Image (cartoon, rainbow, N blue to C red):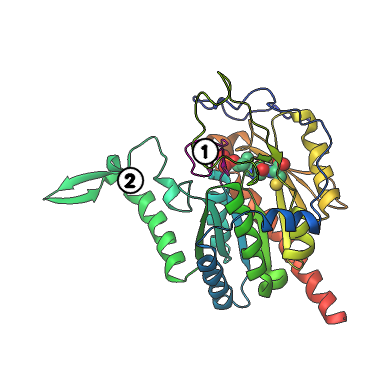
Amino acid sequence: MDYTRHHLPPPTRRLSTEGGPVIDRTIPLLPPALEIDEHNFFDNSDPPEYLEDLIKETEEFVKFHNGRRIALVTSGGTTVPLENQTVRFIDNFSAGTRGATSAEYFLENNYAVIFLHRQFSLQPYSRHYSHATNCFLDYMEEQDGKVVVGPKYQAEMISVLRKYQAAKDKNLLLLLPFTTIVQYLHTLRAVSEALQPAGCRALFYLAAAVSDFFVPPSRISEHKIQSKAGGNQLKMDLDPVPKFLTRLVDKWAPSAMIISFKLETDSTILLSKAHQALERYSHQLVIGNLLQTRKYEVVFVEPNSPEFWIRLSDRQAKDQVEVESLIIPAVIERHNAWIKKSDEMAKDS
Ligand code: 9Z3
């Protein structure tokens, strides 16, 4: 298998994280979280103070879309604060491209979408104009004392605007924010439970880049760490973040179809890690991707099926086809089968 195949020249501005492995990913995976780990984590960390509002919004959204398929898309990186009154934090590279782009293709396929995203990361539709090399003002010009969109941007912008407004008018997109790993996990659990009435019509598409390590509340400094506190070095012990996927599959969303992503930088371990995750959590699909090639290819790892690669052809890459436009139809095909199987099992029982 040629993992290193690039269909396009590498991006001109490469991220500093693109290169050799940063941590030893060859060590065995952490054991899945048990009920006791769930209690320890959630009872000893504060939920975000706005969580009740998000739960209410989610419950109303789920009620409104009774009978429709709902995709919960997680997107962007999670931060790990080093102080309670946070001046410094650890972050990761994810801008939320995979999540925001995938959300658009779900919407185009008549799904309602709950977009659980890192605040200020890319969002469906606006992503075409935010975080771009162009400043948004570059799209505008002045005509007879009015601001208008420049002629060369009209066609694309009207198409994006129409899709955005259609999603808004039909109340198809619910935006829920998080910033820290603790906020993310509290919100994921609460939203999963609020989604239970959607049963097998709910699809979890967990594309957020979730921190593996954090400073637990019991050890976090309340105030800004002083520069002289540890001499000339800052040494901190981070704890592993419990692997809650197993709780999600078994307890928080037992009827939904669940898809997780596996990210690696070392091509030689991607497939084994994806298989391990599938065995460990017994969910329906792991989508494996490498940091370096994630925009061009991914691999589906699922029970009782051969690995299934989705790759942009050279032509597609040149034409800037988004790999998510190929991923989402393949995901939906599997969700169709999941719903069919779940409906048949419900009939039989
Ligand atoms: C992914 O693998 C996503 O595809 C990316 C998307 C984060 C690579 P971008 O935001 O990147 O488009 O720039 N997400 C999952 C990453 C993750 O944290 N997975 C965990 C792991 O690999 C398992 S849940 O251990």
* Nearest to viewer (mark 2 / mark 1): 2
Q: Name the foreground residue: 273 vs 68.
A: 273
- Residue at left offset 82%, top offset 78%: 346
What segment is highlighted magenta in the picture? 76-95
Q: Residues within 10 Å of mark 2 (few under 14, many from 20)?
A: few
Label annotation for residue 153? 2
Q: Position of residue 21 (x, y in %)?
A: 70, 26
Does mark 2's beta carbon lie closer than 8 Å to ligand 1? no
Q: Position of residue 270 (x, y in %)?
A: 77, 35
Dot 1 corresponds to which residue?
319
Q: Residues within 10 Å of mark 1 (few under 14, many from 20)?
A: few
Q: Quadrant of ligand 1?
A: top right
The secondary structure that dominates the magenta segment is: loop
Q: Is residue 345 left or right of residue 118?
A: right
- Residue at left offset 82%, top offset 76%: 344
Q: Please state which amino acid type lies under the numbered disc 2.
A: Tyr
Q: Is residue 245 left or right of residue 150?
A: right
**In the figure, 137 relative to 24: above or below?**
below
Q: Does residue 253 appear in the picture of this structure?
A: no
